[in-house]
Amino acid sequence: MQTQQQIYIKMILDAWHGQNARVDNILATHSDEQLNAAVAPNKNSGIYLIGHLAAVNDAMLPILGFSEKLYPQLENIFLSNPDKSGLEKPTLNQLKKYWNDINSKLKEHLDNTSADDWFTKHNSVSAEDFAKEPHRNKLNIIVNRTIHQSYHVGQLALLKQ
Amino acid sequence: MQTQQQIYIKMILDAWHGQNARVDNILATHSDEQLNAAVAPNKNSGIYLIGHLAAVNDAMLPILGFSEKLYPQLENIFLSNPDKSGLEKPTLNQLKKYWNDINSKLKEHLDNTSADDWFTKHNSVSAEDFAKEPHRNKLNIIVNRTIHQSYHVGQLALLKQ
């Protein structure tokens, strides 16, 4: 018998893993040429969006108190700067390795987070604010990052003609 | 003092309302010409995606046991058939009215759903399956529809040049 707490943690983690599986599937079924193309004229390229999602997932490691980032160099290229920044991007092969490494590490920690720990504060909110806004907990990071990832998956879905 | 259950429900409903506000904002800040354009060459038009999201929200009313659909005619045009089906679409002004009517009705019911009721089964799962998979509750419909909406909001975000 699952408790209600276990049920709602499962709902969110299932949604999170489902979105990441969609990105895995895009990486597995698109050629490098397709991934290097823009999702629409003058919009972000597939490779930029993949790097962006990898950088966001990497940043979850410290926000959730799990570890340091694995690939901190992604932030400048894919979060602080736009696609056409002129900064050198990793190759698609490198990015795929980063994506898998980051998600393996994240999953290991997600699987080991206890039910009550999900409702404790994450590292981007102060103790004072958290006392007033207890919904700003670790599980809410997963909710928001799942929604963010889906936003860009919708764009990546446009890559195939 | 909020219970963990109340905190959790707030997290999900805040995410839901946040996504709908993004669609409201797109409707308020794009011209008809922009909304009638395709999000990318040979892809869905903005108006089709708006109609699609309105149809999905309308279908939540019966799935959550709130009421019949308000605009059942949207299903055939925006869910069962693709953009280029040749079926006559409502005008953008009509669609905006439908969108607002559906979301007002939904919000009224969402606001009146009790905490425990959120964890009961919705109408697209059998009692038998729900006994085995209690995460398939009403709140999970909100989780999944929020993620689905974000997917299309990411596409609608491409409409502006």
Image: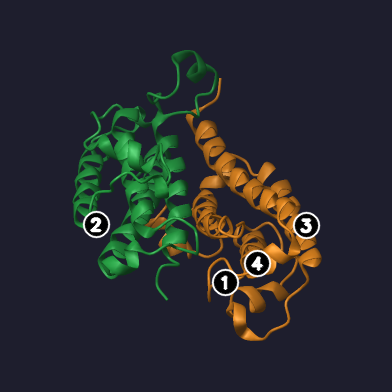
Chain colours: A green, B orange
Q: Residue furthest top?
A: A128
Q: Amino acid at mark 3?
A: Asp
- Would residue B135 be seen by someone viewing this image from the given angle? no
Gap between marks 1 and 2 measured at Cα:
28 Å
Q: Which of these two is toward me, B24 or A7?
A: B24
Residue at x 45% of width, y 42% of height: A143
* Disc 1 target residue: B44
Do callouts 4 and 2 mark residues in contact (Cβ within 8 Å)?
no
Percent of width and height locating residue A46: 37, 59
Chain at tag 1:
B
Chain at tag 4:
B
* Disc 3 target residue: B101
**Which quadrant: the N terminus of chain A?**
top left
The part of the image, by quadrant, that contains residue A56 is top left
Mark in the foreground, 1 or 4: 1
Is A122 located above or below residue A42 in the figure? above
Mark in the foreground, 1 or 2: 2
| Mark 2: secondary structure | helix
* Disc 2 target residue: A92
